[in-house]
Image (cartoon, rainbow, N blue to C red):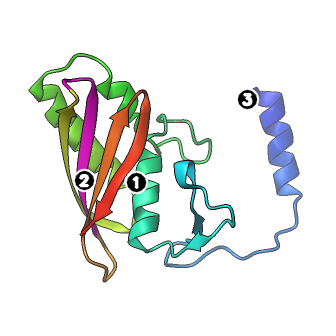
Amino acid sequence: MNSIMQTALDASIASTEKVATTPEEPFGYGTDIKCFESIDPNAVDVDPFSTEAIAQDALHRLSTDPGAMPDDLDYGFNLVGILHKGTDRKFVVMAEGSIEQELLKDDRIAGVDALLTVTNNGKNWRATIRITPKSHRQPFTLVLAVVNGQVLFDSIGA
């Protein structure tokens, strides 16, 4: 965005009347609708602290290019981009650490353990991610498949 547009946008935002207060802990999370490949036709909302919501957000973080969110330039990790090239075990270990660091940016998550494995004779990847929420909820395992240039849900389980 050029400086003229940014200045105009900033002036417009500054003149807007505030109709909502600044969110308080727990960090202003509202509800998250189901999305991606599992868009619910009724736009069903989910509890933002549920396993489902945290898993959805993990998928979004790992399938969004870094810097693609204008309001959070530190959001995102392109799992497809890093895994669709020849690599060695040292690189895989680094990628597992990067996945863990990215997901720990979510303040609902207390711990992450990621494991990347090659599937389909080296054509695809599987990310098995153990997530421990900060809430009273139990840890869960999120399995993502990196296939044909996409990050897809494989499973969510205990």
Mark 1 closeness class: few <14, some 14–19, many ≥20 residues within 10 Å: many
Q: Is residue 62 visible?
A: no
Q: CA distance from mark 1 to mark 2?
A: 10 Å
Q: Earlier in the sequence, mark 1 or mark 2?
A: 1
The image shows residue 62, relative to residue 35, as above or below, that is above
Q: Picture quarter containing residue 34? A: bottom right
Question: If the image is split into quadrants, where does the C terminus sit?
Answer: bottom left
Q: Earlier in the sequence, mark 3 or mark 2?
A: 3
Give the numbered dot on residue 46.
Answer: none
- In the displayed structure image, the side of residue 102 where residue 119 appears, left or right: left
| Label annotation for residue 58 | 1
Label 2 sits on a secondary structure element that is strand
Q: Look at the picture and state if 27 lies above or below 66.
A: below
Q: Which residue is mark 2?
A: 129
Q: Quadrant of residue 7?
A: top right
Q: Which residues are magenta?
A: 121-132
Please name the residue shown 55% across and 49% down the image: 36
In the depicted structure, whether residue 4 falls above or below residue 103: above
Q: Nearer the viewer, mark 1 or mark 3?
A: 1
Q: Main secondary structure of the magenta part?
A: strand
Residue at x 19%, y 32% (from the top left corner): 118
Could you tell me which residue is drawn at 61 percent across and 75 percent down? 23
Mark 3: few, some, or many residues within 10 Å (few <14, many ≥20)?
few
- Residue 141 visible? The answer is yes
Q: Are marks 3 and 2 in contact (CB under 8 Å)?
A: no
Which residue is identified by label 3?
1
Three-letter amino acid code at the position of disc 3: Met
Query: Callout 2 environment at 10 Å: few (<14), some (14 to 19), or many (20+)?
Result: many
- Residue type pointed to by label 1: Ala
Q: Position of residue 63 (x, y in %)?
A: 45, 40
* Residue 67 shown left or right of residue 90 in the figure: right
